[in-house]
Each structure stands twice: as C-alpha cells, then as structure tokens.
Image: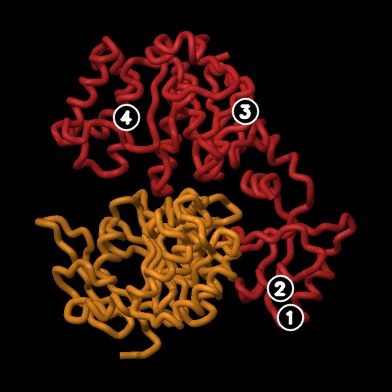
Amino acid sequence: MNNNKVIHVEGLTKMFGDFAAVDAITFDVKKGEIFGFLGANGAGKTTAMKMLIGISSPTSGKASVAGFDVITQAEDIKKNIGYMSQKFALYDDLTVKENITFFGGIYGLSRKHIKEKSAVLIEELGLENVANKLVGSLPLGWKQKLSFSVSLLHDPKIVFLDEPTGGVDPITRRQFWEMIYKAANQGTTVFVTTHYMDEAEYCDRVSIMVNGKIEALDTPKRLKEQFKAADMNDVFLKLARG
Amino acid sequence: MSITISNISKSYKKVKALQDISFEVKPGELFGLIGPDGAGKTTLFRILTTLLIADEGIASVAGFDVITDYKSIRKSVGYMPGKFSLYQDLTVEENLIFFATIFGTTIEENYDLIKEIYIQIEPFKNRRAGKLSGGMKQKLALCCALIHKPKVLFLDEPTTGVDPVSRKEFWEMLKRLQQKNITILVSTPYMDEAALCDRIALIQDGEILEIDTPEAIVKHYPKPIYNVSANNMYQLINYLNDFEPNHSVYPFGEFVHYTDSRSDFNPTELKVYLESKNLSNIKIERTVPTIEDTFMELAK
C-alpha cells in the first residue's frame, strides 16, 4: 500500500436489513490533506465515519485507516486517530486543565508530556485566564476549539471532525478553520463534515454522498467546473436534490 | 404590531442573557433573529411565548401583554423550539391529533394550512415520532405548531444541523406560510438565511448589533472589501494577518475577504507584498459585502 494514503476505502458497505446506508464507497485520502465529507442528512456520512473510526463493522468491503484494517485492527485505529463529535464531549464539570490531563491520560501520555502539552495548548488557545475554570462555563466557540486541541493531544495521524462548527459564531468559526489549516500544514490529515458550504471551499478535496453512494469527489474548483456551479452550495444543491 | 419588545433584559445569575432589547415585528412580516449559540435567541423566544419572565422591560405578542395576558398569547401563537419536543412514543398522526385537540380544534379544520407540509410525512403517519429522520421530525414539529392556525409563529433555529438542500426547502415553505398572513419570527445561526427575511436583527452576547432589511444592513458596511486569492490558502491567511495595515482578514470560501485600515488603500501594494512572500496566482478584486461580513465587523 502507498504510505502516502492515510485512508484507503474500497467498496465499503453497511446494510441495515435491506437498506444500504453506505453503498460500496471507494476513495483514498492523502497525508496532510483536508478532506471534506459532505452529504445531505441521512445520506450515510455518520455511518461511514463510524466504520472508519473502528466503532461499527462493515457488512462488506474493506478499509484501512492510518495503516490499520478497520475490521481486524479496530483498536489500533482508535489509538492512532483523533475524533471530535458535533456534540460537545469534554467534561463540563472538570476545568480546562483537568480535561486535558484526563484525555492525555486516556491516550497514555506520560505526566511530564501532559504537563508540557497542556501549557502549550492553553497558551495557543489563549485560555490562560480560564485554565482553572469549569469547561461548562465557557462559550461554545471556545469549547469547540478546546475539543479540537484535545483531539490532537496524542499527535494522531488523522483527525475526524464531525460538524465541528455548527452554531459557532462566524469569527470563531474562521479561527477554528485556521487551526485546521495549521494542523494540516504540520502533516495531520483532517477528515471533516460540515453543513456550511463556504467551509467546503476550504477543503483540498471534497466528496459528496447521496443515498449511501459517493456521487462526486474532487477539488472544490474542479467540482464547480464539472457542475457549472458558481459555488459549492450550488454544486451541493445540484447533486443532492437528485 | 404583531410583536412589540421594549427594553427587555434577562440575566441568569452572572450571565446577562439579554440586555435592553427593543424592536417590533409588523403583521405578516418574516423577521429573522440572526446570531450564534449563546446570543440570547432562545431566551427571547421563551419570554415572548410566556415560558419565562423577563427581569425588566415589557413585551406584547398579537396585542397581548406577555405577563398580564399570557393565556391569550398561548392560544394565538405557534412555537417550534430548537430542541425536538413532541412525544417520541406517539405516532406522527397521534402527535398532530394531540396538539389539535389541546387547542380545541381538529386536523380537518385547518388542514389547508399544513397540507403542503403534511403530505410529505403522511406516508409515515403510523410511525412513532422518535423513529423519524431529522428532516421529518422538523416537518412534523412545524405541522404541530401550525395546527391551531396561530397569528404569530415562533421558530427557534429550525434549520440548525440541517443540510443545505433541506434548508432551502424549509425556507421556501416559510415564504408560502407568510402569504397566509402569519407573522413569523425565526432564529438562525446561518448568516446566508438572513437574506431571505424581510427584516433581521443581528444579535450577539445578548445585545442587538443592528436591525434593518438585509439589503440596508449590507449597504451600511463601512469599508471597501476585496476578494484575495493565491496558490496557498493557509499561507495567504497568515501573511494577510501579518500585513500591518489590515483592518480585517476573513476566509470566505475560495477567497479571503480583506479590508484595509487606510482610506487610500492601493491593491497593487498588497499584491507586491504577497509576491515578496513567494505566493503566486495572486488575485485581488473588489467584492460586495455579505451579511456575515457585516456581522463580523459589528461583533469585532
């Protein structure tokens, strides 16, 4: 397998009874790429993502993530990826510092390493003044930025972001994307879903799922040419309405 | 006026959720409350639907005071909360019958109002509400909020987490409801939906930043705004942020929206600067501001 491919998916399928939630999808994601995974509600994005992060096993087909097989090496995948869900998943009643320490511990980092990491992370996020405050008291935008940083604590090869910016104010949403760019620039692969079509433009490549299948996959520029669309919103409307 | 809000304030312990909010919504208007999570949108909805009492100020809905005449308001308004609040273990049809009955009406009586929406979920009328997809839940919730033919409809973030296709369909539906003489107050975190409203209020941290028609709000944008693009987006953003005379630098899809702090800004100077940083394919063009540009400028 080409080492440059951090995600390799071939004919991946998930059936629920007679219903193909994910219908034989095939694609690759390269190292350091920002890969946008789009689709309408119910198109199968979440089901596909669950298989890629090793928490749901495929009905057929195969996939490897960070060099590990999703069926036989699911536990290795979990150690080597970061994941941030649309639902805030840090502990509201732990402080910023305590959350970082807790998740660092879960990922098996040493105390010394956690201490160093948390100092850097708190400074980068500008959270010095609230480091000892309960996470529950922070504004949503700060929480989301903190969640993203926590998902990168163990230097994963890939980070999966499931609608990370839903409901976030427009300025913080852009700061969030600057963090994504930075991570990708340092070699982390970013796999991201979003309903903001301007954010789709920020991705290196974008796939669009319709009824369980990947109906389009290319750079935003080429997708716009292919569908003769002014922007990604237009591409999405043309594809997903069908 | 369908809705009148005068100097409303509300705090939760130390948090000022709403600070001295005042505005009016005219009969038949589609009015948008545009702002991110935590702006105070839901608090305002709950005060107007008589579920919460303001600390200060007065408000009326459909001519009734929210404090003294709250029972009349409850009969005259429809409310679709942000969180799905129907009975998960009743079927689609049972939920609708339930809401019609408690408002003293029947599905048949106001069927014309919900027909267009209801026929889309009718094939699933025997399915339990908890088993519906997100889009179908949303349509059922809207039917239940409309079944007693309200004068004023409150929709709290009906499109949050909804994909662009369903969002577009939902707004087309709202436009048609508006034709039936229903006043609609709708909140959304999606700035692109603002353009579909008659008037909007931009709200952040409990304060209103501006109220006007979407066209007028965009016109008030104080500076010339430029689309900038180059071969590397990440480096482009960083270099623009480092460019001393910048006023604002915000990624917008395939471009970065740039404004300069000086009145005599010359784009050529910026191009030369970016070229000196080894960026290529540099393009700098004047563009028109959007609601989102205005929001960020006001929130800065």
* Quadrant of res B236: bottom right
- Residue labelled with disc 4: B117
Q: Are marks 1 and 4 on the same chain?
A: yes
Q: Is residue A43 left or right of residue A32?
A: left
- Residue labelled with disc 1: B277
Cα–Cα span, label 3 and label 2:
40 Å
Please tell me which of labels 1 and 4 falls first in the chain. Answer: 4
User: Badge 2, how many Cα within 10 Å: few under 14, some, many 20+?
Assistant: some
> Is there a contact, CB below 8 Å, between mark 2 and mark 1?
yes
> Which three-letter amino acid code belongs to the residue tagged 2?
Tyr
- Residue labelled with disc 3: B21
Indicate which label's residue lies in the foreground, 3 or 1.
Answer: 3
> Is there a contact, CB below 8 Å, between mark 3 and mark 1?
no
Cα–Cα span, label 4 and label 3:
34 Å
- Residue labelled with disc 2: B239
Indicate which label's residue lies in the foreground, 3 or 2.
Answer: 3
User: What tint does the image give chain B?
Assistant: red
Q: Secondary structure at mark 2?
A: helix
Q: Chain of mark 1?
A: B
User: Badge 4, how many Cα within 10 Å: few under 14, some, many 20+?
Assistant: some
**Where residue A91 sits: x, y (%)?**
38, 58
Q: Nearer the viewer, residue A124 or A91?
A: A91
> Which three-letter amino acid code belongs to the residue tagged 3?
Ile
User: What tint does the image give chain A?
Assistant: orange
**Where residue B145 sits: x, y (%)?**
35, 24
> Which three-letter amino acid code belongs to the residue tagged 4?
Ile
Q: Is residue A12 left or right of residue B33?
A: left
* Quadrant of res A191: bottom left
Q: Secondary structure at mark 3?
A: strand
Judge whether B60 appears above or below B79 on screen: above
